[in-house]
Amino acid sequence: MSGFLPDQPGAEVRLSPNFGPRRETLRPDMIVLHYTGMPTGPGAEAWLCDPASEVSSHYLVHEDGRIVQMVRESDRAWHAGKSSWFGCTDINSCSVGIEIVNPGHSLGYKTFPKRQIKAVIDLCVGIADRHSIPPQRVLAHSDVAPGRKVDPGEKFPWKALFAAGVGHLVPAAPIKMGAALRAGDAGADVEALQSMLALYGYSAEISGVFDRQTEIVVAAFQRHFRRRLVDGVADGSTISTLQRLLAAIKAASSK
C-alpha cells in the first residue's frame, strides 16, 4: 500500500511512518542532501521506513538512479536532526531531505555513480520548482550540522549539480602558501571571517576568537565549497572562495 501519490513524477513510493506535520506554518524553502552511510541501499531504505529507527527522509536515491519517496513534501520528515541555518533550528520543518545511497566515510566511501547523480539533479530541479527554492539553499547535511555530520562529503559532485542549475557554487580559489587563520588566533580578521560565514548561513558565533567551533564550521564550508583540502584552516583560498560566494549572491539579488 503506497499511501500517497509521489510529488516527483516517476518516483516509486514506500511510505515511512516516521514523519509529522511541519511546525509553525513553516514550508519547504531548502533542500538538504545526505548520504545513507549504510552498507546497502535496500538496507537503508528499510531503516528509513522502520518505526524503530525514528528517522526518515522525503526521498531516497539508489545507485541505479531509482527514486523512492517515503514522506510527502508537505510533511515533516525526520532527516536533519540537531541542525541550524540562518538561525533556524528546526531544519526538518523548512526542508526537503534527500538520502543518497553511499556507504559513507566509515564503510568505504566511494564515488557517486553518474546515473545516481543524474537522478539527484532531476529530483532537485523538481523540488526547487515546486517550492521556489533558491540555489543557495540546496545544502549538505554537513552545512546545517557542522561537526556532527560530514555527508554527503567531499566526493559529492557539486560541480555537476551546479552545471545543471542546482545549488550555488563558484570556482574555488587556488590553494597557495601564505597567511592563514587557525585555532587560537583572535582579532578583527577572525571576526570578519565569522561574520562572513554567518552571513552565508552557517551557525558561527561572531566572537573574534578562532575557537574549536569556528574550526569545525570552516571545515564544513571547505567540504562543500573548497573540497581539495578540508582542514579547518582559513587560508587565503578558503576566505577568497567565501567572499566570491557572497558576492555572487549579492550580484544575483541586485538584478
Image: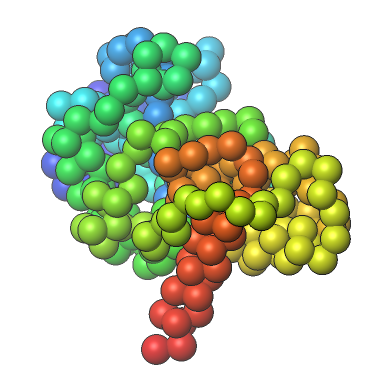
Q: Is residue 134 above or below residue 107?
A: below
Coordinates of residue 237 in the picture (x, y in percent): 52, 56
Residue beneath the point at 85% across and 54% down: 186
Left or right? Give the position of 176 relative to 200.
left
* Quadrant, the C terminus: bottom left
* Quadrant, the N terminus: top left
Residue beneath the point at 72% across and 58% down: 194
Q: Nearer the viewer, residue 101 or 8?
A: 101
Left or right? Give the position of 154 relative to 63.
right
Residue beneath the point at 37% across and 42% down: 72
Left or right? Give the position of 30 relative to 2.
right
Q: Can residue 164 be seen at all in this image of the molecule?
A: yes
Q: Is residue 77 above or below residue 168?
A: above
Q: Is residue 243 above or below residue 77?
A: below
Coordinates of residue 238 in the picture (x, y in percent): 55, 54
Residue beneath the point at 46% across and 29% down: 56
Instruction: Find residue 198 and report its image quarter.
Output: bottom right
Instruction: Find residue 195 and report its image quarter.
Output: bottom right
Tell which residue pokes out farthest to the front in this image. Answer: 177
Q: Can residue 68 be seen at all in this image of the molecule?
A: no
Tell which residue pokes out farthest to the bottom in this image. Answer: 255
Coordinates of residue 129 in the picture (x, y in percent): 29, 63
Q: Nearer the viewer, residue 241 or 14?
A: 241
